[in-house]
């Protein structure tokens, strides 16, 4: 198992407070070097996306600006 796989397996995953009771959500984890991991809460052992800090910042700014509405 490589270091990123180990980091994803041991990360502290969280979902948004309004989604705590839902079964179909995404979860996010803070990773080393400012990266963020994103996975499907229904498949926690499945694949995860990993974003650099600048990619994550651009995504959050796009959400706030309504870019994905």
Image (spheres, rainbow, N blue to C red):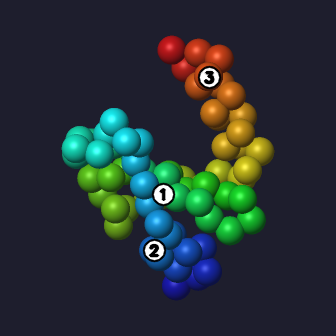
- In the picture as drawn, the residue positioned furthest to the bottom comes out as 1
Residue found at x 40% / y 48%: 15
Mark toward the start of the polypeptide (2 vs 3):
2
The residues tagged by marks 2 and 3 sit, at their Cα atoms, a distance apart of 30 Å
Q: Secondary structure at mark 1?
A: strand
In the rendering, at what x and y percent does residue 62 appear? 65, 25
In the rendering, at what x and y percent does residue 36 appear? 61, 55
The answer to whether one can see residue 25 in this image is: yes
Determine the image quadrant of residue 18: top left
Q: What residue does disc 3 label?
A: 64
Residue found at x 47% / y 76%: 10
Residue found at x 55% / y 75%: 7
Residue found at x 50% / y 70%: 11
Label 1 packing within 10 angstroms: few (<14), some (14-19), many (20+): some
Is 17 situated left or right of 1 in this image? left
Q: What residue does disc 1 label?
A: 48
Discs 1/2, front = 2
Q: Is residue 32 or residue 55 the one in the foreground?
A: 32
Q: Secondary structure at mark 2?
A: helix
In the rendering, at what x and y percent does residue 22 appear? 23, 41
The disc label shown at residue 9, or none: 2
In the rendering, at what x and y percent does residue 27 appear? 42, 51
Mark toward the start of the polypeptide (3 vs 1):
1
Q: Secondary structure at mark 3?
A: helix
């Amino acid at each position: 198992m490589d270091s990123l796989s180990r980091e994803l397996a041991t990360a502290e995953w969280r979902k948004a407070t309004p989604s705590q009771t839902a079964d179909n959500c995404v979860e996010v984890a803070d990773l080393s070097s400012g990266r963020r991991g994103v996975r499907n809460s229904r498949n926690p052992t499945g694949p995860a996306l990993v974003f650099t800090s600048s990619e994550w910042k651009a995504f959050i700014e796009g959400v706030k600006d309504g870019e994905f509405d």
